[in-house]
Image: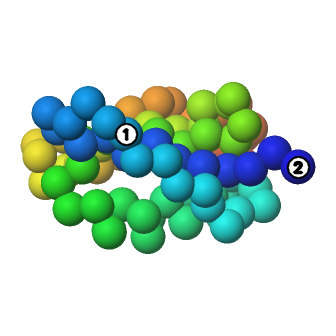
Amino acid sequence: MISYYCIINMPGVPAREIQVLPASDDQSARKALDGVMSEWIGFSTACLYHGERLVEVRSNPDLGFPPEPLLPPAPADRKAAA
């Protein structure tokens, strides 16, 4: 089974935090990522992965980054939104 996990990057810190998420699909992984992001005050980016596949990269709006994901939605997500 391939797990969902996120990598939290902190500004100016060379080490990264990796956390496995309790998720079974991209949508539930994105929701689980919201909770992780709320625990890491001052993070710069949070990268969501499913195995080696990058799902989404989010940045911290408190640091002046946009609140939307930095990566465009996947083709399947664009079709669902239409």
Question: Would residue 8 be found to the left or right of residue 56 on screen?
Answer: left
Q: Which residue appears farthest toward the front when viewing the image? A: 15
Front residue of this view, candidates 27 and 78? 27
| The image quarter in which residue 28 lies | bottom right
Please state which of the two labelled residues, at mark 1 or mark 2, is closer to the viewer.
1
Q: Quadrant of the C terminus?
A: top right
Residue 30 in view of the camera: yes
77 up-or-down from 23: above or below? above
- Give percent across and percent down for residue 69: 41, 41
Cα distance between the residues tagged 1 and 2: 24 Å
Front residue of this view, candidates 12 and 26? 12
- Give percent across and percent down for residue 8: 38, 46
Question: Would residue 14 be found to the left or right of residue 52 on screen?
Answer: left
Which residue was labeled with disc 1? 16
| The image quarter in which residue 23 lies | bottom right
**Residue pictured at 50% horizontal, 30% vertical:** 72
**Residue pictured at 46% horizontal, 43% vertical:** 7
**Which numbered marker is on residue 1?**
2
Type of the residue with mark 2: Met
Type of the residue with mark 1: Arg
User: Mark 2 falls on what kind of element?
Assistant: loop
Front residue of this view, candidates 31 and 9? 9
Residue 78 in view of the camera: no
**Residue pictured at 61% horizontal, 40% vertical:** 49
Question: Would residue 37 be found to the left or right of residue 82 on screen?
Answer: left
- Give percent across and percent down for residue 75: 70, 31
Q: How is the image coloured?
A: rainbow
Q: Residues within 10 Å of mark 2 (few under 14, many from 20)?
A: few
Disc with the residue nearer the chain's start (1 vs 2): 2
